[in-house]
Amino acid sequence: MLAKFKRLEFEAVDGVIRTFYGCSVVGAIEFEERLAELQQALNNHNEEASPEELYRTDKWVRHLINRLLELNGIKPEWCNWDMVSQFVFGRVVDGKATAGYLVGLNTPDKLKKASDDGQAVGGKAGLIAAIATHCQGLEEAYRIAESVPANELLAVLEQKIELAKSPEQRAKEAEDRRFEDWKQKKLQKIKERQVS
C-alpha cells in the first residue's frame, strides 16, 4: 500500500493550475499560531466590517492572511478574494459550513501515533522527534521538518512503521481486525434482536 498525500489544486488568477500540499511541520506550528492571531484580530474589530473589508484596510489582518497563504506555498497574488476566503475562512457545502481548505489540509488525520514500544508520539513535535530518530541529528531533522509538508511526512513515517513489521506481526494484526469486525457484527445483530 502506497502512502496517499493530501493536496489541493486550484486555478490561480494568472490561469495556471497550482498544486500545494500544506505546511511543513515547522510551518504548521506557525500556521496554528497565525490562525489564532487572525481570529483574535478579527474579534477586535467592529462586527459590521467583513473579513474582506478588513483585508483591504487593515495591514495586520492582511499580513496574517497572506502569511497563512505563504506558509502553504501560495503566493497572495495568485488569489482573488473568493479564493482567499475559501482557503482561510471556509465555505458552505450542501448547506453546511465547513472549515477553510487550508485548515483542513493542515489538520492531520492522526495527531498521535503509537510507536513500536507503545509510547505515544504526539503532534508536530512528535513528528520532529520521529524524524530525528531516522536522521544524522536534530539539525537535519529540522531541515526536513521545514521543507516537507507535515501530512506527507506523517504518511511516509506511518508507511515506514508498517514496512518494518514482521510478517507474523502483520498476520496477527489482520487476525485481530477480522475478529473485531466479527465481534461488531455479532453485537449489531444482538442490538437488532433487542429492538424487534
Image: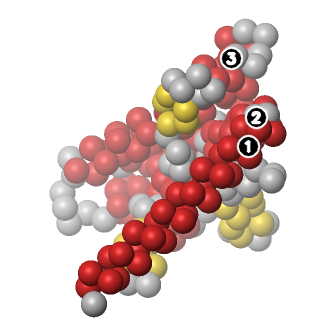
Q: Nearer the viewer, residue 52 or 22?
A: 22
Image coloring type = secondary structure
Instruction: Determine whether, in the image, residue 190 is placed left or right of residue 122.
Output: left
State which quadrant residue 48 falls in: bottom left
C-alpha gap between disc 2 and disc 3: 20 Å
Residue placed at 69% from the left, 67% from the top? 10
Q: Is residue 85 visible in this depiction of the protein?
A: no
C-alpha gap between disc 2 and disc 1: 6 Å
Residue placed at 50% from the left, 28% from the top? 120
Q: Earlier in the sequence, mark 2 or mark 1?
A: 2
Label 1 sits on a secondary structure element that is helix
Instruction: Determine whether, in the image, residue 76 is placed left or right of residue 96.
Output: right
Residue placed at 41% from the left, 56% from the top? 55
C-beta proximity under 8 Å, tags 2 and 3: no
Q: Position of residue 59 (x, y in %)?
A: 40, 44
Q: Which residue is mark 3?
A: 132
Q: Position of residue 184 (x, y in %)?
A: 46, 66
C-beta proximity under 8 Å, tags 3 and 1: no
Question: Callout 1 environment at 10 Å: few (<14), some (14 to 19), or many (20+)?
Answer: some
The amino acid type of the residue labelled 1 equals Arg
Question: Callout 2 environment at 10 Å: few (<14), some (14 to 19), or many (20+)?
Answer: few
The amino acid type of the residue labelled 2 equals Lys
Q: Earlier in the sequence, mark 2 or mark 3?
A: 3
Q: Which residue is mark 1?
A: 170
Question: Callout 3 environment at 10 Å: few (<14), some (14 to 19), or many (20+)?
Answer: some
